[in-house]
Image (cartoon, rainbow, N blue to C red):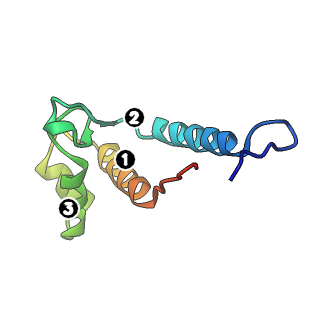
Amino acid sequence: MKNQKNEVGIKKNHLLLWCFNNCYFQYMEFLNRITCKNDVMSGKPCIRNMRVTVGMIVSQIGEGHSIEEILDEYPYLEREDILQALRYAAFRVEEREVVFA
């Protein structure tokens, strides 16, 4: 498929990429407690550069633990840490790969 221009002269696939990146980065601003660094837990998404991964939090919730129980078990975490971990997991599950030909 050739690049088609819309009414303002922007190629459609460029516009889609811009929209995806813009929405992605706007959403990621709400996940400012989720960090990924190669030297912390091998680059897995973590809570505030600590060795607590998003996967650990999601697993705890999946096993039936409440947010309050997790906070009691990890006293250095805050409620917003857990909420952002859940938001991040939901975002990643809904994420779609867009291939431009």
Question: Mark 2 or 3 closer to N-term?
Answer: 2
Element at badge 2? loop
Marks 2/3: CA distance? 21 Å
Please report contact status of discs 3 and 1: CB closer than 8 Å, yes or no: no
- Image point 77% across, 46% down: which residue? 4
* Amino acid at pointer 2: Asn
In the image, taking residue 6 as reference, residue 34 lies left or right, namely left
Element at badge 3? helix
Q: Is residue 75 above or below residue 96?
A: above
Q: Which mark is residue 59?
A: 3
Q: Which residue is mark 2?
A: 32
- Image point 21% across, 70% down: which residue? 64
Marks 3/1: CA distance? 14 Å
Comparing 16 with 89, the one in front is: 16
Question: Mark 1 or 2 closer to N-term?
Answer: 2
In the image, taking residue 92 as reference, residue 66 lies left or right, namely left
- Image point 25% across, 39% down: which residue? 47
Residue 99, image x, y percentages: 53, 52
Q: Which residue is mark 1?
A: 84
Q: Quadrant of residue 62?
A: bottom left
Q: Quadrant of residue 10?
A: top right
Count neighbours of disc 3 (C-alpha within 10 A) and say few if under 14, some if 14 to 19, many if 20 or more: few
